[in-house]
Amino acid sequence: MNRILLVARRDFRQVIATRAFKVTLLFVPVMLGLVMAATSFLRPPSTVAYVMADAGGSTATAVERRLKLDYQRQVLRDLSAYAARWNLPQPGGSRYGYQADDTAVEDFIAQGGAETALKGMHPPPDATSFKPPPLPYVRVPVPKDVPVDQGPAAFGAAIAPYLASDIQTPEGKRPLAVAVYVASGGPARLWTNGRNGNALIDTIQEERTRQLRLALLSANGVTPVAAARIEGIEAPLLVTAPPAGGGRSQLVVRSIVPLVLVYLLLMSSLITGGMMLQGVIDERSNRLLEAVLACVEPRELMLGKLIGLGAVGLTILMAWIGCALLAAFSMEGVVADYLRPSLAALNQPWMLPVLAFYFFCGYLILAMIYLTIGSLSNSLQDAQVYLMPVTMAILLPVMLMVQASITNPGSWLPGVMSWIPIYTPFAMLARLGGGVPAWEMAATGLLLAAFVALELVLLGRVFRASLLSAGQPLGWGGFVKQMLRRD
Amino acid sequence: MTAALVLDGVVKRFGNFTAVDGLSFTVPDGTIFGFLGGNGAGKTTSVRMMLDILRPDAGRIEVLGRAPSRANARQIGFLPEERGLYRLMTVLDTVVYFGRLKGLAAADATKRAVALIERLGLGQWTCIPLEKLSKGMSQKVQLATALVNAPRLLILDEPFSGLDPVNQGILEEIVREAARDGATVIFSTHVMQHAERLADRLLLLARGHKIFEGTQEEARARLPPRLLLTAQTDPSALPGIKSTRVIRDGGDGWRQWDVTLSPGQEAAGLLQHCTANGFVLRGFELARPSLHDVFVHLMGGPLTEEKP
């Protein structure tokens, strides 16, 4: 076997036998699981309860109707997104539209709601089942020990303990978010638990305002029918929106995989770079390099390490990606909804080789830097002299760029960074989802390849010259001198 | 006799410091060659140039008839002065790894490694990671990595440092065995007793310069001959005597004298003169100088810092 591969195999086998490697391998899956568990555990309850003491009854009825219509409008929208995702006919044909008005929603309800609509859509067997969104507010009767006929003060005092805890609802025990007391002819009094009731308060205010307007219109001689018509009027809106996961959201969605790859490249390169650094420092401090160098050229040692630890990085990466895909595809819901269209970014035949190229170059750039730092250092403490500025110089701009790509996919920063070879792999990975002109990809690719070759030559010189050196770590001046010195 | 190693006018500089300065010598095939010198004499730098770990700034090096390169690794065994091994690798894996780096096939390397490990008394530690071994055992493993390819040229840089007397004896025996099997052995040391026991030929290096090259007898000949005479009369007046010194009083007028002869004067001639001229002697003993004495003389100061 080639000596380079022998070195690579030894380094690979040594690293994968360590506990640190196993911990690293499990790190992402475990963290992913913990985050999912924590998210699920910490998520606020989706359905909350409210009570309403309404002597007249009209406010309670109006609020209930409004909540029902708003909820069914949301069901209709979700159903529409579901239809787009599985290429099914839109619920009710196209008559409901994106922003269905009250009449359309009432029609939807009258036709049997989501259940009937789904039957007409004929989802294929492999489609996930449609899950309507949870009901945001559910009205429960006023507890028996809360007086509804002794004025708002007595009602408020009696309901206060209920607002501090959960209350029984048809959905199970839920937090009591809002308690409403509507005195006939007077203002509505509301008590909240301070967390969950803002949208409900808005709805109550809107409905009460509507009632007051109706009363005012009637008092000014408008017939009740005309007044109701005036109050019920809604400006028609014809909204044209791309299907879920399309349009501008498509840009973001298609950038998910490349952006995740930026993070993965960064993490796996930094982890394997750290291993490489530790390995070379160990070899230097264990004084075994001389024996190895009697058998292999420094260049072979360098390449062997790059390949061996590259294989370690690849193993980690594959394990992480595998776990992420497994988790995503075994789940239903938002993650899976976004993952499928984001993977569509990989459909282009040139995409995988391009991703591999940027990944390979990105790894080489970082690994070579770490390898050289290792060869210059007698201990991790020595290495810190170089490590901190180098890591910060890479990490901060890349994190900034990723953030910019997420918040504004059209940001100028990734474009500029694409032309700085040390950042090219990260910037181009981040931009791939949004599309990059072919000429720019070719030009930055060539620049990147030339930079990697130059880095291998220059840092390779420092690596070779520093392997057996002893004493104080090289200063920056000495470092540059070593780079420029021919063998 | 062909030469296993030739250095011809080799110079190596590190910045303004000249570590090896015009070094020339030849190591004949099949000899045990002692490469002697104090710390900083240039021994390790020379060894690294022989192995192509360092390149000379001037001069020519020939190893087994070729320029130094990793292509020679198949025929060279090397034990560096600074020793260390991969702590997490097992004894067997380590020896096999170095065998493979030197070009042995996997099966061959394993077979030889197993045999060597047994021979060095490490059989029960074969599958144990090196971090669990004592320093002495680790050094044996390192020696196995040098020997696994049955080298034609064995280069040992300060091989005895850090070894206890028992293991030093074992190592000396291994060196002799390798030489008996036809290998050329070059070992650097600053402990003269090892060189005295092992080396056919010697080279003394000081501050990068060659001070001496030759056999042990040739080295000793560099010192004026000395005798231990027991007589009642001061031998200073005898011909060919450079200096005398009383070293012991034997009683009844007999004294033991440390006698240094003039350069070129032979002890046998002095004995003949004493016999012919009635100079009464009770003792006439040739004082054979140690290599240590020779090199202190050549260097103008002490060399050995470590007892064997």
Image (cartoon, rainbow, N blue to C red):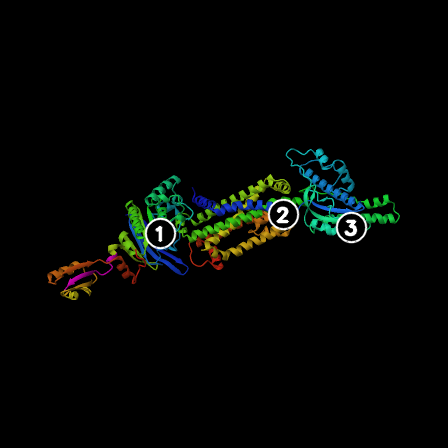
Residue B165 placed where, x, y %? Answer: 30, 52
Q: Could you say which disc has been placed on residue B61 in the image? A: 1
Question: Mark 2 falls within which chain?
Answer: A
- The residue under label 3 is A150
Q: Which amino acid does label 3 sit on?
A: Gln
Give the alpha-carbon distance from disc 3 to disc 2, as whole Å: 39 Å
A409 is higher (above) or lower (below) than B249: above
Most distant residue in the right direction: A221
Say if labels 1 and 3 share a chain.
no
Amino acid type of disc 1?
A: Ile
Q: Is residue B266 above or below residue A246?
A: below
**Vertical position of residue B212 compared to residue A3: above or below:** below
Quadrant where the C terminus of chain B sits is: bottom left
**Could you tell whether A240 is left or right of B129 in the image?**
right
Which of A211 and A164 lies nearest the eye of the viewer? A164
- Residue B230 counted in the magenta span: yes
Give yes or no for residue A421 being in the magenta stretch. no
Eye-nearest disc, 3 or 2:
3
Q: In this view, does B211 lie to the left or right of A309?
A: left
Q: How far apart are marks 1 and 3 (CA)?
A: 111 Å
| Inter-mark Cα distance, 2 to 1 | 73 Å
Q: Is mark 2 on a helix, strand or loop?
A: helix
Please give the range of residues in magenta.
B219-231
Badge 2 crowding class, 10 Å Cα cut-off, few under 14, some 14 to 19, many 20 or more, is few
Mark 2 lies on residue: A42
Lower position in the chain sequence, tag 3 or tag 2 = 2
Compared across the picture, whether A452 is left or right of B62 comes to right
Q: Which of marks 1 and 3 is in front?
A: 3
Q: Do labels 2 and 1 share a chain?
A: no
Q: Is residue A112 visible?
A: yes
Where residue B252 sits: x, y (%)? 13, 65
